[in-house]
Image (spheres, helix red, strand yellow):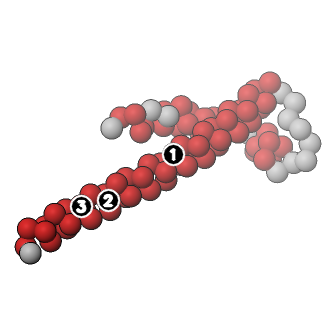
Amino acid sequence: MLKHFAIVPVVLCLSIALALLPSSDFQQMFFSSEPVETPWLITLAMAFAFFLVVWFILSCGYVFSIFSRTLAYHKNIRLIYAVASKKIK
């Protein structure tokens, strides 16, 4: 169960670092067409992009897992009703 929350502390630290940025750096990082220049902003931008991709991959994995479990559950229900209907007749 805890494996689902393993990434949360790292992303929380990244979020706090982004929230504590000076407004000029924040504007340059997200809303400016100019590239960021300082190593700290480059590192934050790369970490943000990395965790955005990780979030997308994890989300796709969870959707696939839910879909496969739903199919397995549906198959199991069909087997249970097939066995039950044979016993009744």
Residue placed most toward the observer, 63 or 33: 63
**Could you tell which of marks 3 and 1 lies nearer the N-terminus?**
1
Disc sitting over residue 75 in the figure: 2
Q: Which mark is residue 79?
A: 3
Q: Calculate the distance from the C-alpha at mark 3 to the C-alpha at mark 2.
A: 6 Å
Cβ–Cβ below 8 Å for labels 1 and 2? no
Query: Which percent across, then down, holds residue 89?
Result: 9, 75
40 left or right, relative to 83 = right
Q: Secondary structure at mark 3?
A: helix
Amino acid type for the residue under numbered disc 3: Leu
Residue occupied by mark 1: 61
Q: Position of residue 42 (x, y in %)?
A: 79, 30
**Which residue: 53% across, 37% down?**
12
Is tag 1's residue or tag 2's residue first in the polypeptide sequence? 1
Instruction: Give the image location of residue 34, x and y in percent.
Output: 92, 42
Residue 72 visible to an observer of this rendering: yes
Type of the residue with mark 1: Gly
Q: Quarter of the image holding residue 35?
A: top right
Q: Amino acid at mark 2?
A: Lys
Residue at the limit of the structure toward the top, as seen here: 39
